[in-house]
Amino acid sequence: MTGKVVWHMTMSLDGFIGDRDDKLDWSFGSTPPSELAADVIRTTGAFMCGGRLVDAVGENRPYGGAWTGPVLIYTRKDPVSNPVPEFTYVSGDIREVVADGLEAADGKNLVVTGGAVPRLSLEAGVVDEIVLHIVPVLLGEGTRFYDSPGVDPTKLELLTTEGMNFRFRVVR
């Protein structure tokens, strides 16, 4: 099996992934577990996010500890500083970092999440799928799911829907 790059995200109904204070509490435990989320966890070999997400959730493991594997933190800071020792801090060209993440995933999928990492990955043409969970809450302001003025539209094909959970393929 060759792994894919999967942008996995939870978003408010009005399109935000973080509230005005970059908090994520509104998203935890607000919807029942889904088979789609379980499938993402089961097929994930490595996980990559940015340093802001680590700042927001601390040293917590992805998926509440239901998954274990390499966690890569994409940062502009010196990767040697490693504030959370069990995470691997990476920097550089997003294409190369994603390729390294896929290698770390060992044939399974690389999940990218957060704000900047998925956006950069999508714009670099390396995202294969987007799995999106929508929480029935209106935040009004915060960090947008996708905010990239000036780029061409990205076409998506709906593959799966399960309640408020969606899987899309990125059309190239």
Image (cartoon, rainbow, N blue to C red):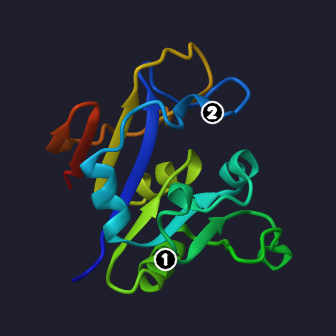
Residue located at (48% from left, 63% from top): 66
Res 127 visible: no
Up/down of 6 relative to 80, above or below:
above
162 vs 2, nearest the viewer: 162
**Which residue is the site of mark 2?**
25
Q: Quadrant of residue 154?
A: top left
**Which residue is the site of mark 1?**
101
Quarter containing the N terminus: bottom left
Q: Is residue 18 left or right of residue 131?
A: right
Q: Is residue 63 left or right of residue 128?
A: right
Tag 1: amino acid: Gly
- Dot label at residue 60: none
Say which element carries label 2.
Answer: helix
* Dot 1 alpha-carbon crowd within 10 angstroms: few under 14, some 14 to 19, many 20 or more: many
Res 68 visible: yes
Up/down of 77 relative to 24, above or below:
below
